[in-house]
Amino acid sequence: MPHALPSRHAAAETREPSSVSGSAGKPHTAHATVATGARPSLATPNHTLILYTRPLHPELVQMKARKTVQLKGLGTGPSRIAGAAEFEAWLTPLGHMLRYQTKTHCFCELVTDRDTGLPTSGVAFSVPAVGEKDHEQLFAEACVLYTTSLQTEMLPPPIYNSTYREMLELAEEVDALLHTWTVPSAGKDQAALRCLSMLELQRFDDEMHAQSTHMFPCFGAGGGLVLRTQTVFQRV
């Protein structure tokens, strides 16, 4: 996994991903879900990326968009059935949750700004979502390789706003899950600050890729923060 996450202008992979359908098996059309109102003030980045080896209860997160993908196993006969998996992506304000479910094992990646009320059992990996980080972990018993990279960047207001517009365009181009909302500004006469969470999914024969972008203002620091993650669940 490269140390820096690719931008929307990075070269495309040579492999062609399969189309990703919604939970009903029909192509999913991305729509921006706009919720106007106050969000918690974010003075400094305080997100965490956590990988669990257990299911997580849906009530743990505030879901804004969802997509489920059925993955067929490789090979033929019993080996193909054993290799089948289900992938589910949940988009939340300021984060996301990914679930990769095989016949015998379940893995959940959670990106959240919460620091209390989170399950402590079944944690395989946890890291503050600040700076640039890479992690790879093989679960031999489940025949699953988990790889993730994250990157945060503080942007001044003009670049933050242009990046926000680019992400809206990209979400429409790639049929991504998207949620947008606004945060009241500190100044009485200033426009509300725009926030965004987006998930782009790609399915391959033996892999599931998820790329996220989360954008929100950081009061007291000036401008806004962009948190990007790239995660791969691979059958090995």
Image (cartoon, rainbow, N blue to C red):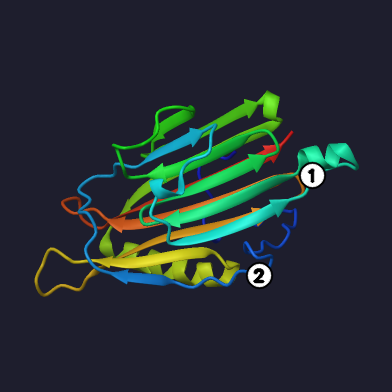
- Corner quadrant of residue 129: top left
Answer with left or right where residue 142 lies relative to residue 120.
Answer: right
Image spot of residue 38 (x, y percent): 21, 63
Which residue lies at the image location 27% right of the left edge and 63% below the top edge? 157
Q: Amino acid at mark 2?
A: Pro
Which residue lies at the image location 68% right of the left edge and 33% below the top edge? 104
Q: Amino acid at mark 1?
A: Gly
Residue that numbered label 1 is attached to: 73
Q: Is any part of residue 153 visible from this angle?
A: yes
The residue lying toward the viewer, choosing from 6 and 62, is 62
Which residue lies at the image location 20% right of the left edge and 73% below the top edge? 191
Q: Secondary structure at mark 1?
A: loop
- Corner quadrant of residue 119: top left
* Sequence-earlier tag: 1 or 2: 2
Which residue lies at the image location 72% right of the left edge and 57% below the top edge? 17
Image spot of residue 184 (x, y percent): 19, 66
Residue that numbered label 2 is attached to: 27
The residue lying toward the viewer, choosing from 104 and 192, is 104
Q: Residue 153, relative to residue 175: is it above or below?
A: above
The quadrant the N terminus occupies is top right
Q: Is any part of residue 3 visible from this angle?
A: no
The quadrant the C terminus occupies is top right
| Mark 2 surroundings within 10 Å by alpha-carbon count, few (fewer than 14), some (14 through 19), many (20 or more) | few
